[in-house]
Image: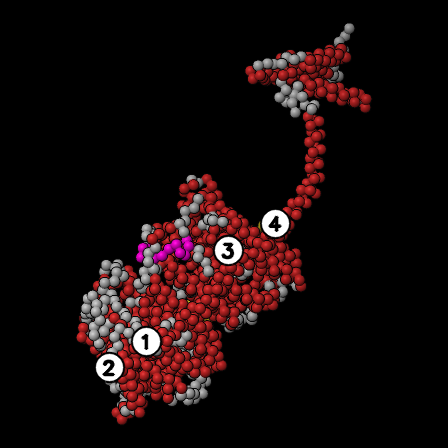
């Protein structure tokens, strides 16, 4: 069984869906963050896959984007975690149900 | 030398003015200094005046002037200047000489006053202004100095400023004369318009020379009468004479200065100065303007002489005698006797100064008492004052031969008798002579004869600084006769610019006997009536109604107060009321209309336009409330919505592709 | 040397801005130093002014809003220069007269800049801008720092003058739509042949007349003035009467008379009657006042009435050159003299108020015994105001009457009553204040202090100088007078 684009895309879609589910259903902020990271990973897989199955894969464009995205994701995770900690300090909880300051 | 004095004639008023400024800079503590500066300045001016006088003697009809540009407006130059002719020369000598005597007298009279220096400042200023009037060769310059004379009189009459009556009298003097000055000002404007110049003499183009008089033409009568308003104001002619008796509120030297040398002389001088305008187009020496002058003079002269008979204040009697004599001078000018009128003015200057200073000496000696009923018997106590006063009294009454006043009065009576228009003024003036002799006799008897009235401290003779001016003035009163007798009428001819001849045969004229008889009658009548007068006036007992009428100055002040002044005051109130209520009311009405239309417009806004806007905004708000319900604040809801949205977009894309 | 006028206008504005960051108690010093510089500039302008050259000098012209013909066009002729000098004299006098808060100082400086602008602008839009710019500070100064009834007086002043301004603006817009220019010189040229025709000419005339008549003020548009002057603080009253009221007369000379010669000829007798009413009724009303400030305010109306009498006389009738020149010279001198004298009178009334806390005619008495110098100074100002020869009031009035008498003898004759009533008013005031026994309430009345002497003496000397040798002012004016006389003839 050779690795085809469809298989990789299916994996990435699954990963994205799992991440989305996590982000939507979990109440703990950290888990939401993890869900978001999973969705980001799925997007990275797509980049790499489309690069790999490109008819002219000479230039490493897809892989470059993926590496950038990973770096940015790391930074974003840092900020996200810092926010979570700040929120915990301020409200004493990380349960997103109780954080409704944005209510219009 | 002649040209030098003409060119530097301005020094004559400038020196007293400078003296006045210098004294202003001195503090009150340096009294001798102040008096010295004033008297020194006056002496220097007298020297210059004599120099100017001698310059006019070189040629008969001497006249010289110096004109210069004061300022330019547009393309026009306003020129003023000064002039020297016999009239000016005679006046400056009289003014400076009499003023000098008064200054010296004041040193004694005001010795204890706390504002001694200020007094001399004002006195010097007063003389300076009057000298400016006399030397002016331009009606404008004359008017300027004229007004300054008014200012000086205001300051001096109100000199004892803490007395309300003095302040009121000063105000009255300034305002009454200003009423006349308004007429004078209009006359000046008219003259400027019609003749195109205000210079009296300007090489043939001046307004008193042929060039100017031609241009004046028909408006001469109106101009002359308007100018006469000013003269009437300053010289106390009816109906503007009311300020003059009140001016007695000032210190006595001031009264002397006003009544003899400066202020009242200005009006007569003015008429004499612009006489060519008065007599322009004369028919046999009569013009409408001169006729008015005559009749005003007659009314003034007789009225004042009558009032003087019923006054008890020593200075008021003299004040009314001044008014009366000024009337006489005006009559003389009006009937054509200019030289006679001016000579009487000069002679009057000497003997009226003498009388006022004499009365000052009496007041001083009687410890500031002015009521003649409380004097009496001063003959022995104040011999010098008595003798000099008697000289003045006889000059004023017109006792013939020795006294200058008699000769000039006679000359005036001559002139009136020759007036072609009417003989009434002549006879009325003759009556005036009797009255003058009568009231002067009355005063002499009350003050100097009879028994001394009881007083806490007896009267005393004044110090020498006060009596010497009296003696000098008395001497002048007598010696002036030398040049004004009909035998050698030098002064008249000098003023008219003609040579004089000596002819002793002319000395005795029929008129001399007439006036002798009249004066004798007046004095005799006075002796007869007042011989035994004690505390009261015999006339007051026999004719109380008439006496009260005269004593109250014919109720003219009250009449003015009830009519002219009341009208003016009412119009002032009315103007104020109109402003506050009528005009301002109109404005407020406009304001109310504005406010009303504003409220109408506001109502329309509220009910009409605003309603639509309000509805819209209410709808928008409701919509907003609905929409905001979706914003739960739950991040996961938002995320879910994003996911759903993305899914929907995906499906849409798939469906469209 | 170009740009002097702009510098003159901008300097007080800069001073006003600088006051915003300065310490409050340094405000008066800054305002005064600012005035020192503007006075220097005015003197420079005067010294370098060519008195023989006709027309405008020191012209600065820049495009501003070409679409509506608005230019930045400033320049001075004799009249403008005279008023610039007057403004430069009156403002320091006012600042010295009274301590003012920082805000008041700033507003005064803005007003000063506006006045310089008004007197030098030669284009209507620019002129109107400055004209209005002076109004708002005056309103605020009365409203915030005024005395009794200040709210009412300020509102009245503002609404009155603003209404007039609006009428004037409308008229000028009308003229612009027909004639297409806002330039004063161009409009004056057009005016000779009739600027507008038919009813629109009368509407335009009425609008401008109303605006200016309120400003001067001319009877019966004057009722704002006594209230405003009475309520304003001393320094502001001085400026209002000394400089601001001149804007109206200036407007008459620059705008109404050259632009509407035919209308004025037709209305001549009525206008003369209004001027005479101003003179007579205002002086009579002054007689009825017991409040000194209100009295001086009424006399201010009376004195500006003489100016209008002269102006209306020479434009309503066909004037000979000598009369037109006399009247115009007289009017300009009167503007200048009245500015100084009336400001001085308000200053003295202010001193009375400051010392005693009251300014009623009957609140004083016998001051001469306590304060001879004060009385002497105030008397000089009063005599100057009543037109005593030798002081500055006389020559202007003499020339006005000289010019108007041949043209309008009866109105002039009636107007001389004003001279009489003014004398009565002032002598009555002198009698009440200075003479008589010393009032108990004045027993501690101090005489002029050293600083006050430094203000009074120069002003008094200036009054004497103008009265005795007026040539130094008249020589500024002569060329302008000749030119204007030709324009009005």
Which residue has dot 1 on it?
B540
Q: Which residue is mark 4?
A: B595
Using the image, tell me which numbered label, if any, was put on residue B478.
2
Judged from the image, the secondary structure of the residue bearing numbered disc 3 is helix
Q: Earlier in the sequence, mark 4 or mark 1?
A: 1
Q: Is residue C168 visible?
A: yes
Q: Chain of mark 4?
A: B
Question: Disc 1 to disc 3, how far (Cα)?
Answer: 57 Å
Whether residue C33 is situated above or below residue C186 in the rendered picture: above
* Magenta highlight range: C359-372
As rendered, which of C283 and A92 lies closer to the eye? C283
The Cα atoms of the two marked residues, 4 and 1, are separated by 72 Å
Q: Could you tell whether C106 is left or right of C258 in the image?
A: left
Chain letter for the residue marked with disc 2 in the picture: B
User: Would residue C368 be counted in the magenta stretch?
Assistant: yes
Answer above or below: position of B168 versus B66.
Answer: above
Choose mark 3 or mark 4, whichever is in front: 4
* Percent coordinates x, y for residue C153 in the rendering: 51, 51
- Residue C331 on image: x %, y %: 48, 64
In-image side of A98 versus B366 (left or right): right
Q: Residue at x 41, y 49 (%)?
A: C98
């Amino acid at each position: 069984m050779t690795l085809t684009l469809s298989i990789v895309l299916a994996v990435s879609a699954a990963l994205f869906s799992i991440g989305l589910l996590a982000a939507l259903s979990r109440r703990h902020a950290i888990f939401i963050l993890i869900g978001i990271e999973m969705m980001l990973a799925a997007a990275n897989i797509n980049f790499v896959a489309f690069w790999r199955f490109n008819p002219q894969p000479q230039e490493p464009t897809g892989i470059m984007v993926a590496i950038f995205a990973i770096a940015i994701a790391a930074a974003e995770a840092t900020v996200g975690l810092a926010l979570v900690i700040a929120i915990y300090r301020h409200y004493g909880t990380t349960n997103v149900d109780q954080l409704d300051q944005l209510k219009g | 030398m002649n040209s030098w004095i003409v060119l530097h004639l301005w020094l004559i008023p400038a020196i007293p003015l400078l003296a006045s400024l210098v004294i202003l800079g001195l503090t009150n503590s340096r009294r001798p200094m102040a008096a010295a500066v004033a008297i020194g300045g006056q002496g220097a001016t007298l020297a210059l005046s004599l120099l100017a006088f001698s310059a006019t003697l070189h040629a008969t009809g001497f006249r010289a002037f110096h004109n210069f540009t004061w300022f330019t407006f547009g393309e026009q130059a306003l020129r003023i200047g000064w002039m020297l002719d016999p009239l000016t020369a005679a006046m400056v000598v009289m003014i400076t000489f009499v003023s000098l005597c008064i200054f010296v007298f004041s040193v004694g009279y005001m010795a204890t006053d706390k504002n001694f220096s200020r007094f001399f400042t004002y006195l010097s200023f007063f003389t300076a202004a009057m000298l400016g009037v006399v030397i002016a060769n331009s009606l404008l310059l004359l008017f300027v100095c004229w007004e300054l004379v008014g200012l000086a009189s205001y300051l001096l009459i109100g000199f004892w400023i803490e007395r309300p009556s003095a302040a009121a009298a000063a105000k009255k003097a300034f305002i009454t004369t200003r009423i006349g000055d308004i007429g004078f000002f209009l006359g000046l404007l008219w003259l400027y318009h019609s003749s195109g110049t205000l210079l009296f003499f300007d090489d043939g183009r001046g307004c008193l020379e042929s060039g100017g008089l031609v241009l004046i033409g028909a408006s001469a009568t109106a101009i002359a009468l308007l100018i006469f308003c000013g003269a009437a104001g300053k010289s106390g002619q009816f109906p503007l004479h009311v300020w003059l008796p009140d001016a007695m509120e000032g210190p006595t030297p001031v009264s002397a200065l006003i009544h003899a040398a400066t202020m009242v002389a200005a009006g007569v001088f003015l008429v004499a100065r612009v006489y060519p305008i008065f007599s322009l187009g004369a028919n046999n020496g009569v013009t409408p303007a001169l006729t008015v002058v005559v009749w005003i003079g007659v009314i003034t002269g007789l009225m004042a002489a009558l009032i003087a008979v019923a006054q008890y204040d020593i200075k008021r009697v003299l004040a009314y005698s001044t008014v009366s004599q000024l009337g006489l001078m005006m009559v003389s000018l009006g009937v054509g006797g200019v030289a006679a009128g001016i000579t009487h003015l000069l002679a009057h200057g000497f003997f009226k100064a003498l009388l006022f200073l004499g009365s000052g000496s009496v007041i001083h000696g009687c410890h500031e008492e002015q009521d003649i009923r409380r004097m009496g018997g001063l003959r022995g106590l104040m011999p010098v004052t008595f003798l000099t006063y008697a000289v003045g009294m006889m000059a004023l009454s017109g006792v013939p031969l020795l006294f200058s006043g008699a000769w000039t009065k006679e000359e005036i009576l001559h002139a009136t008798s020759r007036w072609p228009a009417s003989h009434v003024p002549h006879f009325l003036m003759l009556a005036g002579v009797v009255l003058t002799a009568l009231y002067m006799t009355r005063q002499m008897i009350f003050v100097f004869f009879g028994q001394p009235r009881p007083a806490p401290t007896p009267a005393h003779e004044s110090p020498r600084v006060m009596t010497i001016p009296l003696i000098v003035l008395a001497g002048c009163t007598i010696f002036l006769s030398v040049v004004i007798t009909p035998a050698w009428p030098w002064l008249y001819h000098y003023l008219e610019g003609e040579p004089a001849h000596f002819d002793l045969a002319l000395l005795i004229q029929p008129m001399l006997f007439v006036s002798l008889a009249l004066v004798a009658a007046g004095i005799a009548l006075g002796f007869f009536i007042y011989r035994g007068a004690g505390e009261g006036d015999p006339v007051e007992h026999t004719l109380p109604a008439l006496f009260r009428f005269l004593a109250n100055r014919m109720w003219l002040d009250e009449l003015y107060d009830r009519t002219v002044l009341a009208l003016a005051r009412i119009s002032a109130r009315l103007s104020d009321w109109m402003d506050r209520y009528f005009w301002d009311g109109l404005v407020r009405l406009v304001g109310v209309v504005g406010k009303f239309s504003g409220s109408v417009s506001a109502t329309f806004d509220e009910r009409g336009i605003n309603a639509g806007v309000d509805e819209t905004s209410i709808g928008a708000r409701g919509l907003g409330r609905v929409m905001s319900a979706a914003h739960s604040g739950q991040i996961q809801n938002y995320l879910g919505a994003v996911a759903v949205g993305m899914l929907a977009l995906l499906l849409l894309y798939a469906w469209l592709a | 040397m170009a740009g002097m006028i702009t510098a003159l206008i901008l300097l007080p504005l800069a001073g006003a801005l600088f006051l915003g960051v300065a310490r409050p108690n340094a405000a008066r010093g800054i305002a005064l130093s600012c005035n020192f510089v503007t006075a220097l500039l005015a003197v420079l302008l005067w010294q370098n002014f060519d008195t023989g050259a006709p027309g405008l000098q020191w012209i600065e012209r820049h495009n501003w809003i070409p679409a509506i013909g608005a230019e930045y066009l400033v320049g001075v002729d004799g009249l403008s220069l005279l008023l610039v000098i007057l403004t430069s004299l009156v403002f320091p006098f006012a600042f010295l007269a009274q301590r003012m808060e920082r805000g008041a100082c700033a507003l005064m400086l803005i007003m000063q800049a506006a006045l310089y602008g008004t007197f030098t602008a030669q284009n209507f839009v620019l002129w109107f801008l400055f004209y209005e710019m002076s109004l708002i500070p005056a309103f605020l100064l009365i409203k915030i720092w005024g005395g009794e009834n200040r709210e009412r007086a300020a509102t009245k002043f503002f609404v009155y003058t603003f209404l007039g301004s609006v009428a004037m603006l409308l008229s000028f817009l009308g003229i612009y739509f027909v004639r297409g220019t806002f330039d004063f010189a161009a409009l004056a040229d057009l005016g000779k042949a009739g600027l507008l025709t038919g009813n629109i000419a009368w509407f335009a005339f009425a609008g401008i007349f109303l605006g200016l008549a309120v400003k001067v003020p001319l009877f019966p548009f004057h009722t704002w003035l006594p209230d405003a002057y009475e309520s304003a603080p001393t320094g502001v009253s001085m400026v209002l009467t000394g400089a601001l009221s001149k804007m109206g007369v200036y407007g008459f000379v620059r705008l109404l008379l050259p632009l509407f010669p035919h209308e004025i000829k037709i209305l001549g007798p009525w206008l003369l009657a209004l001027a005479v009413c101003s003179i007579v009724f205002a002086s009579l009303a002054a007689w009825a006042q017991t409040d000194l400030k209100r009295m001086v305010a009424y006399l201010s109306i009376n004195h500006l009435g003489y100016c209008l009498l002269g102006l209306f006389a020479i434009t309503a009738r066909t004037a000979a050159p000598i009369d037109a020149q006399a009247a115009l010279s007289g009017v300009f001198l009167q503007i200048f003299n009245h500015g100084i004298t009336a400001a001085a009178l308000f200053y003295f009334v202010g001193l009375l108020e400051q010392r005693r806390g009251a300014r009623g005619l009957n609140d004083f008495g016998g001051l001469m015994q306590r304060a001879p110098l004060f009385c002497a100074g105030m008397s000089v100002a009063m005599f100057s105001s009543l037109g005593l020869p030798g002081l500055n009031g006389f020559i202007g009035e003499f020339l006005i009457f000289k010019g108007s008498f041949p043209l309008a003898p009866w109105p002039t004759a009636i107007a001389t009553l004003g001279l009489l009533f003014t004398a009565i008013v002032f002598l009555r005031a002198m009698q009440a204040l200075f003479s008589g026994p010393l009032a108990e309430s004045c027993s501690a009345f101090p005489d002029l202090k050293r600083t006050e002497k430094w203000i009074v003496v120069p002003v008094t000397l200036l009054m004497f100088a103008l009265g005795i040798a007026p040539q130094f002012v008249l020589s500024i004016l002569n060329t302008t007078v000749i030119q204007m006389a030709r324009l009005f003839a």
